[in-house]
């Protein structure tokens, strides 16, 4: 059991939120942290008997303590009232890019450059630190990241990357060897204090640079109405909304350029990179209309039917 005197803040991407009450310790695997939780509206050092039933901070499902662990409560699934009571609109936003690159495994390859490129495009500054586990203590260094991944190869390498305090941003970075080359998977989330401060105009330029210089294969950009400080409370929050999807040149070629250029969308894709073998960038909206999920589903289904 772990208890902290301050609010819990994880350096993981804000897709996950902790279970709520009582405190418990994480698994201790790479990238995990001790997670202290407390009952809704309760003190930081809660009483032995909580006033309300415990619940899962991600789904809101009520939990019960059975055989030494928390498990879904018996009977029909029920969402805890406390999970929805604190939900309220917010003007703050989180912009997330989930991207994948693949490059040849040559001697001069430096990892983390695609992540740094995304960080600079969306925040105006490079990452501040990185590490294989939280808390992050190492200054950002693509060279050291590359050395670590080479030492661990062919096993994958997972790392956490964080930004400066005045530029809230957090990312996960995963490196793997594949038959196509060295793959890097990045999920970067940037906090924005207001909707009009979201750098949506930087997304297409970012995609273009990743295509030209970093071997981009895919990139999905989403926007979420949530705390810009990137802390995650055990409360219902709005889901992310797709903004754009980018398909790299290799996959465009595999699916078929003519097929990729005719998506079932009101707006056609923007070609990026070489005119002879372009990547395609599909705008899906400004992140305010959940119908963009329907558009993204239609796009992905369209792309799956190509290349046959």
Image (tube, helix red, strand yellow):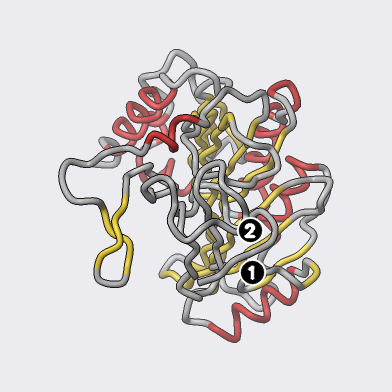
Density class for disc 1 (Cα within 10 Å; few <14, some 14-19, many ≥20) is some
Find residue 290 and report its horizontal and vertical position in percent.
44, 21
Residue at the farthest left position: 75
Find residue 190 and report its horizontal and vertical position in percent.
68, 42
Query: Residue 96's quadrant in the figure?
Result: top right
Residue 134 image label: 1
Marks 1 and 2, how far apart at CA? 7 Å
Find residue 279 and report its horizontal and vertical position in percent.
53, 39
Residue at the farthest bottom position: 151
Residue at the image position 54 percent from the left and 28 percent from the top? 243
In the depicted structure, whether residue 211 falls above or below residue 143: above
Q: Is residue 47 left or right of residue 113?
A: left
Tell me how many marks there are: 2
Q: Is residue 162 left or right of residue 35?
A: right
Choose between 185 and 27: the one closer to the eye. Answer: 27
Q: Secondary structure at mark 1?
A: loop
Residue 22 image label: none
Labels 1 & 2 near each other (Cβ < 8 A): yes
Query: Residue 41's quadrant in the figure?
Result: top right
Find residue 161 and report its horizontal and vertical position in percent.
68, 61
Q: Which residue is mark 2?
A: 11
In the depicted structure, whether residue 303 falls above or below residue 99: above
Choose between 45 and 25: the one closer to the eye. Answer: 45
Residue at the image position 73 percent from the left and 40 percent from the top? 122
The quadrant of the picture occupied by the C terminus is: top left
Residue at the image position 63 percent from the left and 40 percent from the top? 207
In the depicted structure, whether residue 7 falls above or below residue 66: above
Residue at the image position 53 percent from the left and 25 percent from the top? 283
């Amino acid at each position: 059991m772990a208890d902290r005197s301050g609010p819990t803040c994880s350096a993981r991407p804000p897709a996950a939120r902790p279970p709520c009450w009582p405190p418990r310790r994480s698994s201790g695997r790479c990238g995990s942290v001790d997670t202290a939780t407390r009952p809704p509206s309760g003190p930081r050092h809660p009483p032995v008997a909580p006033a309300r039933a415990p619940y899962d901070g991600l789904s809101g499902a009520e939990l019960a303590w059975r055989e030494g662990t928390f498990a879904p409560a018996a009977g029909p699934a029920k969402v805890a009232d406390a999970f929805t009571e604190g939900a309220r609109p917010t003007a703050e936003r989180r912009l997330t890019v989930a991207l994948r690159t693949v490059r040849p495994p040559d001697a001069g390859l430096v990892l983390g450059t695609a992540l740094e490129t995304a960080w600079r495009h969306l925040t105006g500054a490079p990452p501040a630190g990185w590490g294989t586990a939280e808390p992050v203590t190492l200054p950002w260094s693509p060279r050291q990241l590359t050395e670590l991944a080479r030492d661990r190869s062919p096993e994958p390498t997972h790392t956490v990357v964080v930004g400066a305090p005045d530029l809230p941003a957090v990312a996960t970075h995963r490196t793997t060897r594949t038959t196509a080359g060295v793959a890097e998977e990045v999920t970067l989330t940037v906090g924005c204090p207001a909707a009009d401060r979201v750098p949506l105009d930087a997304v297409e330029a970012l995609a273009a640079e990743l295509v030209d210089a970093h071997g981009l294969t895919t990139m999905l950009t989403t926007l979420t109405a949530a705390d810009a400080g990137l802390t995650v409370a055990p409360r219902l929050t709005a889901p992310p909304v797709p903004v754009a999807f980018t398909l790299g040149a290799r996959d465009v070629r595999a699916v078929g350029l003519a097929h990729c250029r005719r998506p079932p969308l009101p707006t056609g894709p923007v070609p990026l990179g070489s005119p002879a073998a372009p990547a395609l960038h599909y705008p899906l909206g400004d992140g305010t209309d959940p119908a963009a999920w329907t558009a993204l589903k239609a796009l992905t289904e369209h792309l799956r039917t190509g290349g046959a």
